[in-house]
Amino acid sequence: MSKRIAIYPGTFDPITKGHLDIINRGRILFDTLIVAVANSSPKSPLFSVTERVDIIRNEVKKHKNIKVESFDGLLVNYAHEKKASTLLRGLRVISDFEYEFQMALTNRELAPDIETVFMMTAENYAHISSRFIRDIARLGGDLKSFVSPSVARALKKKNKK
């Protein structure tokens, strides 16, 4: 029987408790879950791709079936390279759905052999976005409800530079 490999792609700048909720629930559904950190992004990330990968690895290190890597280029090409059959996408609010739906249909057109699975984040994390967290951190706000203590420390350190 072939292994069920899924990719959970994103910018993760920074990784939030909502992201970790999807990762922790996704790792149960698949034999291997690859958290794929986008290297090229239209967004201007606060953390470098190497920093983001290191931060996420630290967050998930106790789980043996989670891998954290960065990738460039088309996600479906990366999925084929990793022999993944599923893309795992997290949804927070209804406004996420339209964008994610369009992306899923585009990916299906490019790679019909790869399925996209949507997972709703836990309701207590639905309002969290990395963009808001970066703003809260920059302005010196309390981050404990939104990110882990190690991510909060990394944000604090990054904002002191």
Image (cartoon, helix red, strand yellow):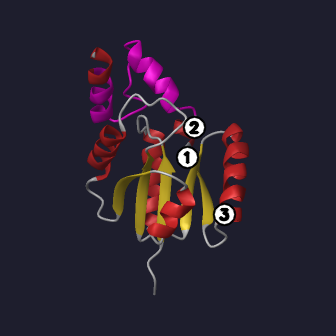
Q: Are marks 3 and 2 in contact (CB under 8 Å)?
A: no
Location of residue 81 in the rendering, given as x and y in whole percent from the top left corner: 46, 68
Residue in the picture at 70% in, 56% down: 106
Residue 126, disc:
2
**Mark 3 residue type:** Leu
| Mark 3 residue element | helix
Neighbourhood count class around disc 2 (C-alpha, 10 Å): few under 14, some 14–19, many 20 upward: some
Q: Which x, y percent locates residue 161?
A: 27, 16
Say whether residue 160 is left or right of residue 74: left
Residue beneath disc 3: 110
Q: What SS does tag 2 mark?
A: loop
Q: How far is the residue under mark 1 from the one under mark 3?
A: 27 Å
Badge 1: residue crowd in 10 Å (few <14, some 14–19, many ≥20): many
Nearer the observer, disc 1 or disc 3? Answer: 3
Please tell me whether residue 71 is drawn above or below residue 142 in the rendered image.
Answer: below
Q: Quadrant of residue 49?
A: top left
Q: Which disc is residue 20 wearing? A: none
- Reply yes or no: does residue 128 show up in magenta: yes
Q: Which residue is mark 1?
A: 121
- Cβ atoms at labels 2 and 1 below 8 Å apart: yes
For numbered disc 1, what is the local secondary structure?
A: loop
Where are the magenta residues, as a range? 127-156
Kind of residue indicated by mark 2: Ala
